[in-house]
Amino acid sequence: MTRFVLDSNLYIEAIRDQTKAAALAEFTIASLTHVVLHAVVVQELLAGAVSELARRDVYRDLIRPFERRGRILTPSYQAWRRSGEMVATLIEQGELTVGGVPRSFTNDAVLAASCREEGLTLITRNRRDFERIQRLERFRFVDPWPNV
């Protein structure tokens, strides 16, 4: 069966919208043993939780269950290196500017490189950035929610 990583945008929309939360829960229940949490997503979720209470909730509800099961993916040195090469190439091609690379895009490049390395499929709503990255790094990503 395909193994998945969920982009942070899916968790964020679930926090903000009960309908999205129900869809996330349904997918997670159906494919729990095939979903891993990426360390970049952990960083983005915690960075967006701007109060101690919010960070506790994010950790308890979203991160800790994956930690307990040993299903956290930490990017390798090769993934970090490749992400830097991809960003540099996009700057060289004029698609990004040296001072204008958002941190979220750099994180997306790391996410894509490590998904390729591990053979994981990324589930995201961020098609624009990942289509740009995919021209340089062949990896699989899909819109929510794939049939499992």
Image (cartoon, grey):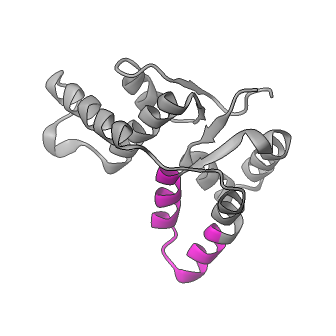
Q: Please, is residue 29 above or below residue 63 in the view?
A: above
Left or right: 45 with respect to 68?
Answer: left
**Camera-side residue: 59 or 119?**
119
Q: Give the range drawn in magenta.
A: 39-59
Work out which quarter of the rendered image holds the C terminus and state it: top right
Secondary structure mainly formed by the magenta segment: helix
Residue located 47% across and 59% down the image: 43
Left or right: 44 with respect to 89?
Answer: right
Q: Residue furthest bottom?
A: 52
Quarter residue 66 falls in = bottom right
Q: Please, is residue 136 above or below residue 57 in the view?
A: above
Magenta highlight on residue 58: yes
Work out which quarter of the rendered image holds the N terminus and state it: top right
**Camera-side residue: 145 or 138?**
138
Magenta highlight on residue 89: no
Q: Please, is residue 146 above or below residue 25 in the view?
A: above
Left or right: 9 with respect to 107?
Answer: right
Quarter residue 77 falls in = top left
Quarter residue 80 falls in = top left
The percent position of residue 41, horizontal first and vertical second, equals 52, 52
Residue located 63% across and 62% down the image: 63
**Camera-side residue: 95 or 120?**
120
Residue located 75% across and 46% down the image: 24
The percent position of residue 70, horizontal first and vertical second, equals 66, 55
Left or right: 37 with respect to 48?
Answer: right
The percent position of residue 37, horizontal first and vertical second, equals 61, 49
Residue located 64% across and 45% down the image: 36
The percent position of residue 85, horizontal first and vertical second, equals 24, 31
